[in-house]
Amino acid sequence: MFSFLSFAAILSLILHSFDAIVKAQDAPQYSSTGLLSTTQAGPVVPDHTNLPATLTLTRPNGPLPTSTGKNGSCKNVQAAGVSGDSQRAQAIKDAFVYAWDAYEKYAYGFDELEPLSANGTNSRYGWGLTIVDSIDTAIIMDLEDVVEKMLKFIATVDFTTTDEGDPVNLFETNIRYIGGLISAYDLLKSGQFPNNYDQSLVDGLLEQAVRLTNIVILGFNTPSGLPAAELNWTTRAPIPGEYTDDATNTTYNATNTASSGTFVLDWARLSDLTGNETYRRITEKANSYLVNPSPPPVYPGLVGTQFNTDTGKMLTFDGGWQAGVDSFLEYLIKDYQYSPTNTTLQYRDFWLTAVQSTLESLVSHPFGFPDLTFISYLDVNGTIRYFADDFSCFAGGNYLLGGALLDIPEITALGIAYTDGCHQTYNTTTTGLGPLAWAWFNSSGQAYNPASENDAAALKSASKRGFWIPARVENWFSRPEPIESIWYAHRITGDPRWAEYNWEIFKAINETSRNRLAFAAVNNVDMPGGGSMSDALDSFFFAEVLKYLYLTFTEPDVIDLSEWVFNTEAHPFLATCAGGQGNGTSAGGSGRSSKAML
Ligand SMILES: *[C@@H]1O[C@H](CO)[C@@H](O)[C@H](O)[C@H]1NC(C)=O
Ligand SMILES: *[C@@H]1O[C@H](CO)[C@@H](O)[C@H](O)[C@H]1NC(C)=O
Ligand SMILES: *[C@@H]1O[C@H](CO)[C@@H](O)[C@H](O)[C@H]1NC(C)=O
Ligand SMILES: *[C@@H]1O[C@H](CO)[C@@H](O)[C@H](O)[C@H]1NC(C)=O
Ligand SMILES: *[C@@H]1O[C@H](CO)[C@@H](O)[C@H](O)[C@H]1NC(C)=O
Ligand SMILES: *[C@@H]1O[C@H](CO)[C@@H](O)[C@H](O)[C@H]1NC(C)=O
Ligand SMILES: *[C@@H]1O[C@H](CO)[C@@H](O)[C@H](O)[C@H]1NC(C)=O
Ligand SMILES: *[C@@H]1O[C@H](CO)[C@@H](O)[C@H](O)[C@H]1NC(C)=O
Ligand SMILES: *[C@@H]1O[C@H](CO)[C@@H](O)[C@H](O)[C@H]1NC(C)=O
Ligand SMILES: *[C@@H]1O[C@H](CO)[C@@H](O)[C@H](O)[C@H]1NC(C)=O
Ligand SMILES: *[C@@H]1O[C@H](CO)[C@@H](O)[C@H](O)[C@H]1NC(C)=O
Ligand SMILES: *[C@@H]1O[C@H](CO)[C@@H](O)[C@H](O)[C@H]1NC(C)=O
């Protein structure tokens, strides 16, 4: 999941960081290659040097294989022999309860808890975001008293108005609120989790999702059908985003790619649950511009971050897997897994094209670290930059899922390599948590900004661990992506080292981000104790961080990846192959009894 706000923030931080480096004229004038070449290879990471440099991926022919899964209908993507660890799972459940109790005590009904000031804040329209975003985690953890309370609260929310008076961001509303509601409904109707609740409250989850979506859908009312970034909740008028091309000083009505390409999965599920095809049709129309980009990107499949909502044209060439593009690419393979159709076959092929370009052009092994794999991004002109953000770390898990689904070992290898690369940005810092973004010298010792080749701190850090953390991006704000990919790697490869990684990360969170009330954002991952904290506990700490950690230690039939497809905020939906066609009444899943749970 990426956050729309942090996307803008990251870009400005990145620009400022590099400005700061350029201005660091007093840094000692080392020869970069001289300093770096004296360094031994850094920490040992598994051998990734055999990643193919160029390849033609074998394209699967026709729809999904349908008979190899354990259900008989779904393609099995999980490894055999994965086992849980009930003590560790319990520790993560305890962390959820600890933070939830604080939210309940100090911020109940507000969107989010402010964990330092013991207060609530309405960061997203005052509809009780933390409750809606975390109910599915509570369901999966079997916290029945908590779920009951959440269900009652959700029934009282009036999504048709907001007291806050802010324009409503449609992407965030979809992934957190709509996705959370649909997923809670799906989980409770699946027969896989306890459901001793008032069924009118359970049915109310879907009714609330429909009510909210029927307003959000008005944001697609633009000349092209690409959704506007925001909606005026009073007038229901779309409010277009803007993009200014610096080279020509022209401003366009625009959307970023991830914002508009992150509806197809959630709304396909909603169409299947309600029998109303409008949701699927509207989002597939919007996605049609993104998967037929005009003008074409520099590297096939790697679309830029901005599209014109009046014409559907692509405005920039800054492709990759980073914020602004990320969940658009993420959903292409997931929507195909959710339900193979003619349209999602096209998504699958576009995803394969993007992965192929990534293998050929974006994969980068830092200088002195041939075994370490990072994925570069492209600037607005399509030039490769040796720089990545933490959001892009979802990609490792996404490659692992696609590789297993399509039986393409090169893609699985890429997934393992990048998940290890992201892990390296966690396990080499002072706190054991990773930064918002990092930069590196490429295999010939060059940075995309030559000034950093003379930056002493960058050189020292890069020679020790293969990357450096530019100024102002040192924080860990409850971001889930590396944890997410480590969980996919655990379930898909069955290699026990992944579970150990997530346990180490959990311990780091528990040590660094825990305070006397709950958990809080950490300002500097490279300072003892994280330096200081910020007064924020984002709802995705409950929705994503704790869910992926918990599922690392449950038995693997709890949310089997062969049957459940996660939205970008970690809300699982039942795939059609596992009975997710209808409105929940026919859901079968793996038939796991709730007795088998912790
Ligand atoms: C960091 O993680 C990698 C795997 O992702 C592992 O091989 C390496 O030993 C770890 N390094 C440290 C310093 O813990
Ligand atoms: C607590 O939150 C309320 C509502 O957002 C706000 O009015 C109040 O000033 C906050 N109090 C503190 C101590 O931050
Ligand atoms: C929404 O529209 C109303 C009526 O035109 C206007 O007064 C208000 O400022 C708008 N709100 C936003 C957030 O644009
Ligand atoms: C399907 O949803 C659309 C979008 O909200 C709505 O306009 C339409 O009336 C719905 N159709 C039915 C049959 O409910
Ligand atoms: C992209 O190209 C334009 C036109 O050549 C140039 O003005 C601009 O500085 C370039 N942007 C970057 C980030 O290199
Ligand atoms: C860009 O255009 C706006 C008006 O469209 C103008 O106010 C501004 O001065 C221009 N900026 C540059 C750098 O040309
Ligand atoms: C942007 O959209 C508004 C309508 O929301 C329209 O009035 C305006 O002309 C558009 N701007 C451009 C540059 O097309
Ligand atoms: C899907 O594509 C196939 C082959 O092009 C075509 O025969 C079939 O009618 C299409 N199905 C739908 C539902 O459009
Ligand atoms: C390293 O980066 C420099 C500067 O961008 C580039 O010219 C060179 O080709 C790159 N080397 C490799 C091996 O990618
Ligand atoms: C998490 O932190 C709390 C408070 O310091 C401690 O009691 C608990 O044992 C820690 N959990 C783990 C798994 O380290
Ligand atoms: C689910 O489908 C059944 C049978 O089609 C229908 O009776 C029921 O009203 C539907 N429930 C919801 C919540 O749409
Ligand atoms: C497998 O999924 C189907 C839906 O296609 C469902 O009806 C069935 O109950 C599931 N089988 C098992 C053994 O869980």
Image: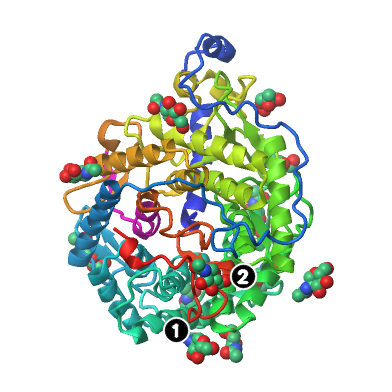
Question: Which of marks 2 and 1 precedes in the sequence?
Answer: 1
Judge from the rendering whether residue 519 lies leftward or rightward of residue 557; answer left or right.
left
Q: Give amino acid for label 2.
A: Pro
The magenta segment is 532-547
Q: Is residue 473 visible?
A: no
Which residue is at the front of the view, 327 or 559? 559
453 over 399 or under it: above or below: above
The structure residue drawn at horizontal position 41% and vertical position 38%, both measured from the top left corner, is 434
The quarter of the picture where the C terminus appears is: bottom left
Residue 432 in percent (x, y) is at 35, 34
- Disc 2 on helix, strand or loop? loop
Between 114 and 395, the residue placed more toward the observer is: 395
Query: Residue type at mark 1?
Result: Glu
For disc 2, the neighbor class at 10 Å (few under 14, some 14 to 19, many from 20) is many
Q: Position of residue 30 (x, y in %)?
A: 52, 12
Q: In the rendering, at what x and y percent does residue 478 appear?
A: 36, 49
Q: Is residue 565 placed above or below 209 in the rendered structure?
A: above
The residue that disc 1 covers is 207
State the mark number for residue 227: 2
**Could you say where residue 563 lies in the image, as x and y percent from the top left?**
52, 62
Is residue 291 a member of the stretch shown in magenta? no
Residue at 58%, 13% in the rendered image: 33
* 578 on left or right of 517: right
Mark 2 CB within 8 Å of ligand 7: no
Ligand 5, image quadrant it occupies: top right
